[in-house]
Amino acid sequence: MSTEARIIAEIEALKVNDLDTQDLYREVCTILFFRYGITPTANKLYQYVRKGSMSAPAEALARFWSDLREKSRVRIEHPDLPDGLKAAAGELVASLWSQAQAGAQEGLAVFRQEAQERVTNSQQSCEAADQARVAVQTEMNQTREALREAEERILQLERNLAAESARTQSLEQQLDAAGRQQIALEAALAEARKDYSAELEKSRLELRRTEERLAANEKRALMEIDHERQMTMKAQRELQLLRNSSLENEAQLRIELADSNAELADTRQKLGVADGKQDELRATNKTQIEELAAFRLTLARQDTQLALLQREIELAQTASKQLQESIASKSAIPKVPRRNRKV
């Protein structure tokens, strides 16, 4: 508290005592002069007290100085002492009083200086405390700002976590759909393998039967051709025998020769028919070979389709595995709890 504030506080405390105006002004003069070392004036007294007219502080101030001078004068009253000694003794006592008062003033000055130093130190302490308070307030503001930013980051993390949770849920739905698709593809593959195996076994059986029929037809055609060749050779041998017969039987031979020629023509006709059958069998064999080649091409296409279907299943399994790994990695994100903090 400053000196002016302390003076005002003490004067207000005097006003509470309900003193007379002159007594109040005299007490104020005493406080100013003896306690604070301030020379009182009428204007200053009126500024502090503000009671009565302007002549009241002047009158009180005059009486204060008169009382002070009267008290500072020392009188020696003794009937046996001469007047000169009384005056000398009075002057000596006054001198001692003046010296004592000067010493008191010096002590008061020292006390005032120490008090001023204490006040200065207190003011410096107050200023340091104010600076510390400002620093603490600044730090608190920074802490509040950091807390606000941390809460904003927590909110952002919670929003990101919600988005990641939604994305994870979507990925799980996609994974379930991919799993169902994989199961359907595996069922389709199993059915295709079953149909393919049945069709392949049926085709192999048909091919084996066709090959057996071709071999039988070829064997039969070869047997018929060989039989016709044997018949032709037999006819030629018989014709040769007829030519070597005697001339006497020439007519008979000619008849037999005609018969033989007719039989030979018939044999040749049969041989032509056998050659035609052989050509027909060859054509049939060629057609069956072409059908077998087409069937083998169909089988190759089915093998290609089966390989493509297996490749699609492998790709679906790979995508399913990647989705599971992605879901596992997203599920590993720690949840950040939100805290409501008050500063």
Image (cartoon, rainbow, N blue to C red):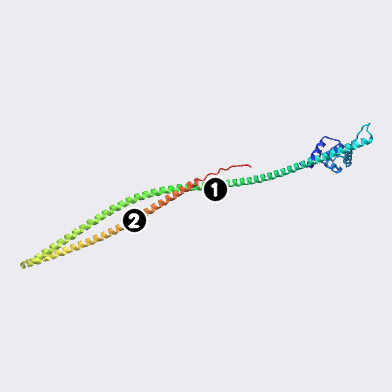
Q: Position of residue 107 (x, y in %)?
A: 80, 39
Q: Nearer the viewer, residue 110 or 11?
A: 110
Q: Nearer the viewer, residue 309 or 315?
A: 315
Badge 1 or badge 2: first in the primary sequence: 1
Identify which residue is drawn at 43% across, 50% down. Answer: 318
Taking the image as shown, residue 338 lies to the left or right of residue 283, namely right
Mark 1 lies on residue: 160
**Which element type, helix, strand or loop, lies under badge 1?**
helix
- Is residue 92 shown to the viewer in this render? yes
Labels in figure, total: 2
What is the CA distance from the residue labelled 1 to the residue labelled 2? Answer: 53 Å
Q: Position of residue 236 (x, y in %)?
A: 13, 64
Query: Residue 99's quadrant in the figure?
Result: top right
Q: Nearer the viewer, residue 96 or 182?
A: 96
Q: Mark 2 is on which residue type?
A: Ala
Q: Quadrant of the N terminus?
A: top right
Identify which residue is drawn at 29% across, 53% down. Answer: 204
**Which element type, helix, strand or loop, lies under badge 2?**
helix
Which mark's residue is nearer the viewer, 1 or 2?
1
Q: Position of residue 306 (x, y in %)?
A: 37, 53
Mark 2 lies on residue: 300
Q: Mark 1 is on which residue type?
A: Asn
Circle 1: is it few (<14), some (14-19), or many (20+) Cα within 10 Å?
Answer: few
Taking the image as shown, residue 57 lies to the left or right of residue 191, namely right
Q: Quadrant of the C terminus?
A: top right
